[in-house]
Amino acid sequence: MKTKNLKVTAEIKKLFEDGSKVKAAANLTIEGVFVVRGVRLVDGKNGLFVSMPSRKTAEGEYIDICFPINNDTRLTILGAVTAAYEKALSEQTAEDTDDSEADGGEQESA
């Protein structure tokens, strides 16, 4: 089943340090009317994927609270979160460069 072009926007709430499998935490807005908080962008063995919010059952298993039910929607969500992540990384790099230039770009020598 093919879905219509779903409008999904993502807002990165937190970037995680290098070395962590979790790269970012984000919120999604779907069609401007539905928000999903607490999704995570994870670097898995097959590449990046979006981990949806989940809860722990009495048996100790984790189950997703919400999730896409077809591949088109999953890919749309992944694309939105990945694009927001790349934008947040570039903004962070620009801020780091601005901070370095504000310091004169010089390091003290011992």
Image (spheres, rainbow, N blue to C red):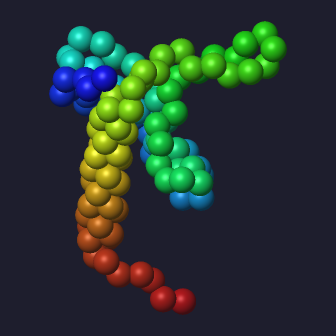
Q: Is residue 81 visible?
A: no
User: Which residue lies at the image location 25% right of the left edge and 30% below the top edge?
Assistant: 9
Left or right, 5 with reference to 67: left
Q: In which quarter of the view is residue 108 placed?
A: bottom left
- Is 40 drawn above or below residue 99 in the view shown? above
Q: Nearer the viewer, residue 63 or 34?
A: 63
Q: Nearer the viewer, residue 3 or 68?
A: 3
In the picture, measured across the screen, residue 16 lies left or right of residue 1, that is: right
Q: Quadrant of residue 106?
A: bottom left
Q: Residue furthest bottom?
A: 110
Q: Is residue 90 above or below residue 66?
A: below
Q: Is residue 32 above or below residue 2?
A: above
Which residue is depicted at the point 31% across and 77% down? 105
Query: Left or right: 58 with respect to 83?
Result: right
Image quadrant holding the N terminus, namely top left
Give the x, y percent position of residue 53.
53, 23
**Residue 5 seen from this side:** yes
Which of the 4 image quadrants contains residue 22?
top right
Identity of the residue drawn at 46% across and 37% down = 50
Q: Position of residue 17 (x, y in %)?
A: 54, 53
Image spot of residue 107 (x, y percent): 41, 81
Q: Quadrant of the C terminus?
A: bottom right
Query: Farthest front residue?
Result: 1
How many numbered dots are placed on residues in this image?
Answer: 0
Q: Considering depth in this image, is 91 or 73 the residue closer to the camera?
A: 73
Give left or right: position of 40 versus 61.
left
